[in-house]
Image (cartoon, rainbow, N blue to C red):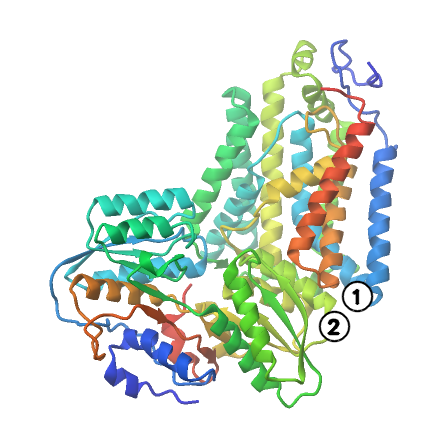
Amino acid sequence: MTQPASPARPATSKTTPAGPRPKGFRPDMRTLSLVGVLAALILIGGITQPDSFLDTNNVQLILTQASVIGVVTVGMTFVIISGGIDLSVGAIVALASVWATTVATQDYGFAGILFTAVVVGVACGLVNGLLIAYGGMVPFIATLAMLASGRGLALQITDGKTQTVSVESVLKLGERDAYILGIPPLVLVFAAVTVVGWLVLNRTTFGRRSVAVGGNAEAARLAGIDVRRQRLYLYLLSGLCCGIAAFLLIVLAGSGQNTNGNLYELDAIAAAIIGGTLLTGGRGTITGSVLGVLIFTTITNIFALNNLQSDVQEIAKGAIIVAAVLVQRRTSTTTS
Amino acid sequence: MPETTSRRGLLFGAAAAVTTGGLLTACTSNEPKDAKPAANDKPAADDKPGKHVTIGFAGPQADHGWLNAINDNATERAKKYSDVTLEATEGSNDTAAQIGQVETLINKKVDVLVILPADGKALTQVGLKAMRAGIPVVNLDRIFNTPQAYRCWIGGDNYGMGLSAGNYIGEQLKDKKNAKVVELAGLDNLELTKQRTQGFDDALKNFPNIKKVARQAAEFTVESGQAKMSQLLQAQKNFDAVWNHDDDQGVGALRAIKQAGRDDFLMVGGAGALSAMQAIEAGNSVLKATVLYPPTMAASAIDLARALGQNKGVSGMAEFEIPAHVTLFSAVVDKDNVAQYMPTGFK
């Protein structure tokens, strides 16, 4: 067994093949290589479009565009670390955003929209969690079902129409006047979610248990962890992140539409995996996932600034995923 | 800009004028400022009740403003006729499911079929099957592979949409030296997006002073419209006009423009959403015009299907039969004529 011994109490069971990572802010080679990739991209962007890439507006733009999917990815990272998967994140974002904007049309204001988005997100996460933890369903199937029914429900609510928001206090959050020291509020939310996510994963029992469940659920159970309840909480967490992301999307796009969050599930999974999270569970970092999101967003930005078309962009995205996973296989110490 | 509809209004039933009249003008001229008849509630063909007709309608899943308007237009128009029963299937984007739905309608022996296929090529066989079973097919918008699979095709003109948009922008910028335009296209994996771009590029060739400096494809959604437009704005520090293929994604594009605090160019939209027309009328944004791709074609398809079922021609036309092809005209709606078109705007 080549995995480093885990300092975490409940996970030190002898049968745990993949214990939690050493705690503390010690970037490993993988994280450093991601920073290297990002730096290389910034260099490419700076060389190809020196005028438009490196100006403040563009940095704000990249970070803003990373915010919505970034928040979703933080939740997704927890789920994947625990050995699960959440295919329903995009659908939950869609459902939460249309429900919140339906409320918006009835003039409940800022709090009403935020509250509805979060509650719908958590409710969907609760359903996922109950089905998986207590219904014994495979996460892939349970969240696939949520994807289908969530999108269907979102379509039914909107009737295919775009629900625009006219609540000024919500819209203003996405505009330049609301920037705090040059930082868009959306980016601040993203940063806060990232920091909280990092702390929860690395500094709390909840985080250790998540890793333990993903490493070896049976061992975690023997070690006294209520695996079912832990799983329920993890899908709730993912749902919560989707609810927050839905609110950010409403601020950004000024509307709710049943097509919102299209393919977020794939983007979030891809970002987490590029960031070094094992799809089989037991290992992963928030830092890596966030770097994964930033890498994707920066690529999209560079392509757009250089007026390259979406097909080329998709091909490049695919190539990067393959490359990252190949590298991960080489460096991975866990065989499954 | 001539706003009269009288000539054709006399000749045709008004809705047929939208379609057939559009075809005529499209054939005689590429000028976007030709006469544009208004859509209204008056059904085409013969208004007098005739033989009872059961029309089977298989539409797409209404996950987009325009498609939703298509379904609404079809059902609303069918209700206007006392002699028409509409058998509408659940909308679907799944080719296999839609084939099954059409087959069910064939088995029910409806008199006429109206099909807007999720994928025209993939639904061709089932169109042929219906025709062979003696049920005439009105193919709506997305065209089948072979004319044998339909009795009549009615749809929009994607190439013409690009052409109208390009010519309108050209007229606005013709006196400006080294004018720059950008294009916010729709879903690039749809053929119609390429046709719209081709029409736009061809129109711009009439104006050598204008250069298209950038094109990005979005996905027909508000979210993608916002994301792609904010990047276009970052990439192009100054340009004079933007053509956005779709008013739904235009909601996002307008939001991105507001967020970037830009107002140094004009924008032309596409499809004819109500929100776009309202913005054009208000005149307080960069959106100055939109090029129509009217969902009223679904109502006209019901008219044509009814005429087919009753063996009638189109009133006002000399022929005994309805036409084989009807292409709608991609009219430009701007501040001057927006009041006229407002009733056709879809949510």
Q: Residue at position x 18%, y 64% from top?
A: B81
Q: Residue at position x 75%, y 63% from top?
A: A306
- Location of residue A229 by image quarter: top right
Q: Position of residue B276 (x, y in %)?
A: 49, 70
Locate residue B334 relative to residue B48 in the image: left or right. Answer: right
Whether discs 1 and 2 lie on one chain: the answer is: no
Mark 2 falls within which chain? Answer: B
The crowding category of the residue bearing disc 2, from other C-alpha atoms within 10 Å (few below 14, some 14 to 19, many at least 20), is: few
**Res. A52 mark:** 1
The reply to whether callout 1 and callout 2 are in contact (CB within 8 Å) is yes
Q: Label 1 to label 2, Cα distance in Å?
A: 8 Å
Q: Position of residue A252 (x, y in %)?
A: 62, 57
The crowding category of the residue bearing disc 1, from other C-alpha atoms within 10 Å (few below 14, some 14 to 19, many at least 20), is: many
| Residue bearing the label numbered 2 | B237
- Location of residue B49 by image quarter: bottom left
Vertical placement of residue A326 versus B28, above or below: above
Identify residue type, mark 1.
Answer: Ser
Viewer-proximal residue, A262 or B10?
A: B10
Does the rendering let one see residue B174?
yes
**Which of the image's four quarters has the C terminus of chain B?**
bottom left
Identify residue type, mark 2.
Answer: Lys
Mark 1 falls within which chain? Answer: A
